Image (cartoon, grey):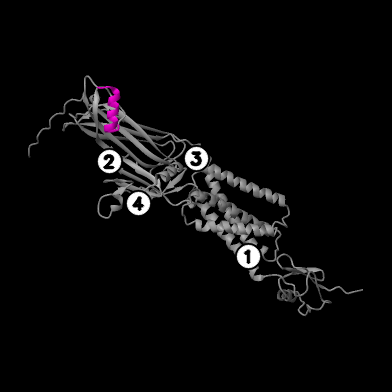
Amino acid sequence: MSIRPWVVVEAPDSRGLRRVTVGGEHIGSAWSPGELRRLLDRHGHPDVDLEDPASVCWRGGDSGTWPDRAWRRRAVLVLMVVGLLASGLLDAVIGWPDASAALTFAQRVTGALLVLSGVVQGAAAIAALDYWGRRHSRTSGALVLLGVLLSLATDSLLVLMWLEEREYTPYMLAFLPLWCWSLWALRLLVRARSWKGVPQPRKYAAGLFTSALVTAVSLAYSTVYQPAVAPMRFTLKAAFGTARADRERPFVQVPLQLSVRNTGDVAVYVIVNDFSVYGRTAAYSETGNSVEEQWKRSIDENAEEDAERHVDRLQYSLLSSGRFYDPGTVLDSGQEDTRQHVFQLPANAAYDLLRVDLQMTYMRKDRGRIDVRTFGKAHVSWGRGNGRYSCVLLRCADQFVYHARVRHNNNLVNVTRSPRYVTAVWSPELSPVYSVSSYHLRGRGVDPAEETRDVNRFGIGEVHAYSEVSAAELLGSMPSPRPSRPTSPR
């Protein structure tokens, strides 16, 4: 009857780690002879002769078989932990603005899922310490695999969105290297079959697929479907009131009633708005010319499409101009605002028609966010030190310039695009103009193709209201103003 050795060192596993049992009881694992001796010392066997076959049984190799490459294993561990932590931090940074301040519920869900993905990857980084260590937990490998898959999915989405425009953004210095890292990490984990040891691998795979599906549906809903199904509707009104003669001067006071109501389901930012009153003069002819001839002439001379047989040489003079809202004002769904503006007109004015134009340019609040504190501040184009505002958007004049950063409501888009800015220019004598693009008051001008894409993405639109009234109706029935009486000195 032979005496069995009471210390057994098993064959190295795929990582070079050898399992150790003493008297049939598992006491740990060792990477090297030094670790084996320390392990035996801790369990009260400091004097075991490792070369004595009566004391130690070596399986799958002798006392010199230690295939572990410590530097390589530690390098892989460091790369895995750093990659998981960096990817998790990136997901949390991208998702938090949407999770905390997005306008719609779906966008908040998308942001919360990104933050949750960052938390899971942080837990996976902790699990990597065990998986590339002693593997005390059976699920550490599966958790690391889940973290790498989340990183690959998020980084792949960021890369695809970046490829759409291929614009420089500081975030590309993070997600492009992380995408390459996630491919390397996934290949390494698949070769090691890291999911082995999971108690119910089918449920694990089903949960992973469900999480990916929910994330994809939430993202698609928040970025495509929800903004598209909410139409914009506004009611703008502009009308002249009853004119009254000035008691002291030969002028007529004409009230103007303006009204704006958001009848849609989405709040908007007011980018720029304007109301202008014009007086029309014309030359009249009893015989007249053909309507077609008058129509061509009105387009060539005044860019007007209206034409009349007995009216020629239409001229419009600006009588009054102003703004209904300050740029950056938020107009909520269902909100209605009214304003009454009074302008003066000479009693003997030669105008035959009066016309008022009310215009508003808006941006959907569910498509983007404007820094209203910056945008609401007007920059004047005149004065010392304001030369950068004198010629903006190909227009040089005395004008107010409004400029601020604008961000998409989906932060995934913000981090894969270069910064966008909204610019609005208003002057009392010129039509308001605006731009939403990468134009930042310096460098190159606005790219028309880029601006068109951004206008559509941010849901920018314009609404107008017009009203005309006969000057004879307003002024013809007015009594002549009484002459002012000279005042005698006291």
Give the residue number, with chain letter if any, for mark 3.
227
Span highlighted in magenta in the image: 289-303
Circle count = 4
Q: CA distance from mark 4 to mark 3?
A: 30 Å
Point out the frontmost of discs 4 and 2: 4
> Can residue 192 be seen at all in this image of the molecule?
yes
> Can residue 100 be seen at all in this image of the molecule?
no
Residue 462 lies in quadrant: top left
Of callouts 4 and 1, the N-terminal one: 1
88 or 112: nearer the viewer: 88
Check disc 4 and report its element: helix, strand or loop.
loop
Mark 1 vs 3: CB contact within 8 A: no
Q: Main secondary structure of the magenta part?
A: helix
Check disc 1 and report its element: helix, strand or loop.
helix
Residue at 25% in and 54% down: 384
Mark 2 vs 1: CB contact within 8 A: no
Give the residue number, with chain letter if any, for mark 2.
428
Q: CA distance from mark 3 to mark 2?
A: 34 Å
Categorize mark 3 by other alpha carbons within 10 Å: few (<14), some (14-19), many (20+): some
Q: Amino acid at mark 1?
A: Leu
Q: Is residue 449 left or right of residue 119?
A: left
Categorize mark 4 by other alpha carbons within 10 Å: few (<14), some (14-19), many (20+): some
Give the residue number, with chain letter if any, for mark 4.
441
Q: Position of residue 180 (x, y in %)?
A: 57, 58
Give the residue number, with chain letter if any, for mark 1.
77
- In the rendered image, the residue lying farthest to the left is 489
Q: CA distance from mark 2 to mark 1?
A: 66 Å
Q: Position of residue 423 (x, y in %)?
A: 36, 47
Point out the frontmost of discs 4 and 3: 4
264 or 442: nearer the viewer: 442
